[in-house]
Amino acid sequence: MNRTSFALKPLAFALAVAAVAFSAPRETLASDHADGLKTAVDLGADITDLFAFTSPKDPNKMVLIMNVHALSFSQSRFSNSADYKFRIRPIENAQTLKPSASKEETVVCSFAKGAFLVAPKQQATCVFNFASGKETLTFDTRSDKFTAGGSGEKGDIRAFAGVRSDPWFLDLGRTVKLSNGELADRTPGKNGLNGSNILSIVVEFNKSRLASPLVAVAAQTVRK
Amino acid sequence: MNIKHLLLALGLALAAAPMGCAEEEPPPEETDDDLIFGQGTVDQAGIVESTTMMLAALPTSSQLDQYNREDPFKIVGTSYRATFADRLAQFDRADGRVDWKTDAAAAWADRMASANYLVIDTSKPCAYAGHNYLEIERATLTGRAYTSCGGRVPNEDAMDTTINFLVRGPGASVIDSNALGDGVDQATQKASDTFPYLADMN
């Protein structure tokens, strides 16, 4: 075994993330991108956006999207030591919109295999845990169907994991000014995330699987 | 070349170096990031700009990492409530008017200090090219019935919705004549209406 090379890999990784850390705190990318010193370094577990909607093609399908890693490129991969969780709780009081304190359904995706920079293909496992039952989907994060992504399907359940165009858009300078109390003029702005990519997890399932139609949805990354 | 690029180049060069060793064994199952990061929650997300606008003006605030590490359905830190309330009051004054009623502002600060989540009603229609984000919250805060699914669809301008919500109050619409915005209305590539929805990488 080439011990020197394996000793260098953590150092290489540390240097690469240090590069991100040096740049991120100056100006946030917002939504939820690099929204703190720790997440600006731990990009693989830094959630950038969460989406929840019913499919425009089939309103009976619930779609959840969690994006991470604001500086993704074709070789980027998910962390093998993190769980990527969609957490869904019924809202029992429509006036307060407070979610249940105890009832929860989840979709948890985890990843294995692959290697930093040189082998982006990972094995994804997404566990759908509903009140009505549990389903597990396993697939590769690279396939011929996508430039840098892969998907799996079982019955009404589908999941995708891979690199996509970042759907977030904003004028960074104007957002920073607004954050400090200064309103922007009404002229066209400049998308500070133009050309950016993210790592995305997309899951889809029949909405009838959920215990309630009115739900609270959160995303969470947890290092194991 | 600035320091960011220098460090990135050094990192990439060191990472690529082992590739040339023909006799090298396969990499271990353990990943590089295992060696650097600890355990537990790294990040949680629900409401757009919950941290970078609503909780702090700068991404260096110490409250951000702390808030990110919270359970999104059971936030226990006690310091956020006052900050959310103060920040909301600051945004509300940005246009020279006070639009948020006291009870609604308190309800929003309470919500963000206790949990961070999207609300979606899957029995209502999601306008894929329209405005759904925060509609349920805005309706609830102003005492009217909501009509959309809420949640959040990829192409909608959640930043403009957020700006109008914070500055002009929960009764303000993102599409009326006085609507504020950041002047950017679309991502690099629009999401499609078919799985996996988000556009291919750039």
Image (tube, coloured by chain):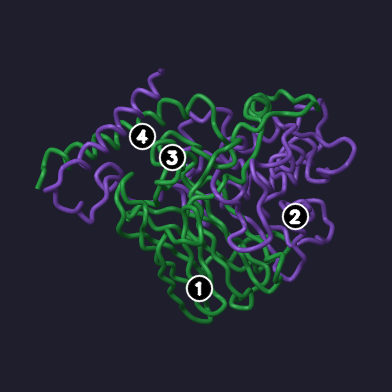
Chain colours: A green, B purple
Badge 2 and badge 3 both on one subunit = no
Return the residue at label 2: B132
Residue B66 at x, y percent in the picture: 45, 41
Q: Is residue A101 above or below residue A210?
A: above
Return the residue at label 1: A153
**Residue type marked 3:** Thr
Residue B63 at x, y percent in the picture: 48, 36
Mark 1, residues whose alpha carbon is within 10 Å: few (<14), some, or many (≥20)? some
**Residue type marked 2:** Asn
Looking at the image, is mark 4 or mark 2 nearer the viewer? 4
- Residue at the (74%, 43%) spot, across then down: B161
Return the residue at label 3: A39
Q: Identify the mark nearer the N-term, 3 or 1.
A: 3
Residue A218, quarter of picture: bottom right
Q: Relative to A158, is A6 on the left or the right?
A: left
Residue nearest the viewer, comparing A129 with B9: B9
Mark 2, residues whose alpha carbon is within 10 Å: few (<14), some, or many (≥20)? many
**Residue type marked 4:** Val
Mark 4, residues whose alpha carbon is within 10 Å: few (<14), some, or many (≥20)? some
What's the distance in space between the residues labelled 2 and 3, CA to CA?
Answer: 28 Å
Looking at the rendering, in which quadrant would you find the C terminus of chain A? bottom left
Mark 3, residues whose alpha carbon is within 10 Å: few (<14), some, or many (≥20)? many
Badge 3 and badge 1 both on one subunit = yes
